[in-house]
């Protein structure tokens, strides 16, 4: 499973729905939706500022993450952004990989 950060904003009727049913209902809905595609909710936080929510979830693969993002966007009630997260061990592995890179202009 891979970890993803979903962050975004409620828009239009999405805001009205959140006000009507509250935050706990939204968290339960997200847990249920993620479970239905083989995923797992790690954490869900509401915020104020640039983004309204931050969600970290485990999903089987990038195709599943893309499906989540598409479904959320298609609802028209949220404006999401998806970020792939990697572990410190994966970063270690990446740091130890080499490839032939030539910077622009060199």
Image (cartoon, rainbow, N blue to C red):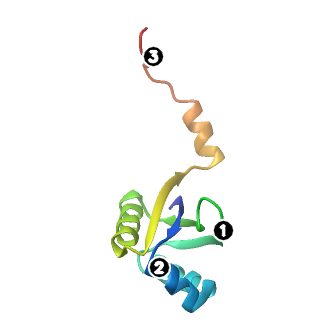
Q: Would residue 35 be visible to someone looking at this image?
A: no
Q: Position of residue 51 (x, y in %)?
A: 58, 62
- In the rendering, which numbered label is found on residue 1? none
Going 53% across and 80% down the picture, which residue do you hit?
Answer: 31
Above or below for 31 versus 106: below
Q: Is residue 103 left or right of residue 54?
A: left
Above or below for 92 versus 58: above
Mark 3 lies on a secondary structure that is: loop
Task: Work out whether mark 1 precedes mark 3 in sequence or the reverse, and give the earlier one.
Answer: 1
Residue underneath mark 2 = 14
How many angstroms separate mark 1 from mark 2 (CA)? 15 Å
Going 41% across and 10% down the picture, which residue do you hit?
Answer: 105
Residue underneath mark 1 = 47
Mark 2 lies on a secondary structure that is: helix
Q: Is residue 53 left or right of residue 32?
A: right
Task: Work out whether mark 1 precedes mark 2 in sequence or the reverse, and give the earlier one.
Answer: 2
Task: Work out whether mark 2 precedes mark 3 in sequence or the reverse, and give the earlier one.
Answer: 2
How many angstroms separate mark 1 from mark 3 (CA)? 39 Å
Query: Mark 2 Cα within 10 Å, few/some/many (few <14, many 20+)?
Result: some
Residue furthest to the bottom in view is 20
Going 43% across and 15% down the picture, which residue do you hit?
Answer: 102
The quarter of the picture where residue 43 lies is bottom right
Front residue of 96/46: it is 46
Query: Mark 3 Cα within 10 Å, few/some/many (few <14, many 20+)?
Result: few
Mark 1 lies on a secondary structure that is: loop
- In the rendering, which numbered label is found on residue 103? 3
Front residue of 26/39: it is 26
The quarter of the picture where residue 28 lies is bottom right
How many angstroms separate mark 2 from mark 3 (CA)? 45 Å
Eye-nearest disc, 2 or 3: 2
Q: Position of residue 58 (x, y in %)?
A: 53, 65
């Amino acid at each position: 499973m891979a970890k993803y950060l979903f962050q975004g904003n409620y828009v239009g009727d999405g805001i009205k729905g959140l006000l009507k049913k509250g935050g706990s209902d939204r968290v339960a809905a997200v847990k249920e939706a993620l479970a239905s595609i083989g995923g797992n909710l790690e954490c869900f936080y509401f915020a104020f500022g640039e983004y309204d929510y931050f969600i970290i979830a485990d999903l089987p693969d990038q195709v599943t993450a893309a499906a989540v993002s598409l479904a959320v966007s298609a609802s028209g009630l949220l404006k999401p952004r998806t970020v792939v997260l990697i572990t410190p061990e994966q970063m270690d592995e990446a740091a130890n990989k080499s490839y032939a890179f030539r910077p622009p202009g060199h």
